[in-house]
């Protein structure tokens, strides 16, 4: 019996160590507020997907998204309400992505979505689904406050990923996001894949 108890205790300790290791791994790769991949993790996922797209000569879509007027929400309703909005926005975005897409909190109220196998048309469709998921209804933060929310998105999906690198993809998506903000927010803009390595042109793609 003593040997059995000792063996069980060893197994329990091993399980505790495994659980602790898994918890640390989650903490290291996930954003504590939203539960999404954190900046470092989503950047690493993008790197791996780009390498795979280059190796297999398949397409890759990248979406940079930013909640509109989020500072105003924090200033008006307070940071706890802002946190609630971020969590609900995350839930809506997750409901709109495919199971093999990856979404991370890139920083603040900004999100990065990696869309494997997506050409320009399908990447735009995915971005539009994300936009619609956010703007479909106000977010209720308490019984007396329902906050309308929209999101702006920049998209890039180079036809030849082998001619791109991480920096050029992120720069292209970020420039397209800037255009979406500049042109009124709550819209999707596509960065042309042409010249993406040297600073992409931006083609206006208004939402429906």
Image: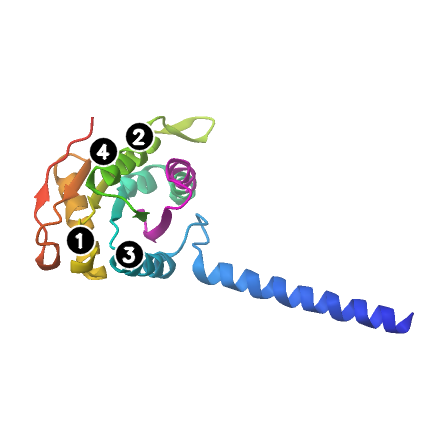
- Residue 203: where, in percent of width, then height? 10, 40
Neighbour class for label 2 at 10 Å: few (<14), some, many (≥20)?
Answer: many
Question: How far is disc 4 from disc 3 in space, using C-alphas?
Answer: 34 Å
Is 7 on the left-hand or right-hand side of 114? Answer: right
Neighbour class for label 1 at 10 Å: few (<14), some, many (≥20)?
Answer: some
Q: Nearer the viewer, residue 17 or 142?
A: 17
- SS assignment at label 4: loop
Question: How far is disc 3 from disc 2 in space, using C-alphas?
Answer: 32 Å
> Looking at the image, what colour scheme do you see?
rainbow
Is 191 on the left-hand or right-hand side of 18? Answer: left
Q: Tell me which corner region of the image, top left, top right, bottom left or bottom right, holds residue 16.
A: bottom right
> Which range of residues does the magenta coloring cover?
87-111
106 within the magenta span:
yes
Question: How far is disc 1 from disc 3 in space, using C-alphas?
Answer: 11 Å
Q: Residue 186: which disc?
A: 4
Q: Which residue is mark 3?
A: 56
Asked whether disc 1 touches disc 3, contact meaning CB atoms under 8 Å apart, the reply is no
Mark 2 vs mark 4: which is more N-terminal?
A: 2
Neighbour class for label 4 at 10 Å: few (<14), some, many (≥20)?
Answer: many
């Amino acid at each position: 019996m003593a040997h059995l108890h000792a063996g069980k205790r060893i197994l329990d300790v091993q399980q505790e160590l495994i659980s602790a290791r898994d918890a640390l791994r989650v903490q290291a790769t996930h954003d504590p507020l939203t539960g999404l991949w954190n900046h470092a993790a989503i950047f690493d996922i993008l790197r791996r997907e780009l390498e795979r797209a280059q190796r297999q000569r398949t397409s890759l879509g990248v979406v940079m998204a930013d909640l509109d007027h989020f500072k105003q929400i924090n200033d008006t309703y307070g940071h706890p309400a802002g946190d609630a909005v971020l969590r609900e926005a995350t839930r809506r975005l997750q409901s709109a992505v495919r199971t093999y897409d990856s979404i991370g909190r890139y920083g603040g109220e900004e999100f990065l979505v990696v869309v494997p196998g997506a050409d320009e048309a399908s990447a735009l469709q995915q971005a539009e689904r994300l936009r619609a998921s956010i703007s479909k209804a106000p977010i209720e933060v308490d019984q007396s406050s329902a906050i309308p929310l929209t999101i702006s998105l920049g998209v890039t999906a180079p036809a030849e990923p082998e001619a791109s690198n991480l920096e050029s993809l992120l720069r292209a998506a970020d420039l397209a996001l800037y255009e979406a903000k500049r042109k009124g927010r709550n819209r999707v803009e596509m960065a042309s894949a042409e010249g993406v390595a040297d600073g992409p042109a931006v083609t206006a793609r208004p939402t429906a």
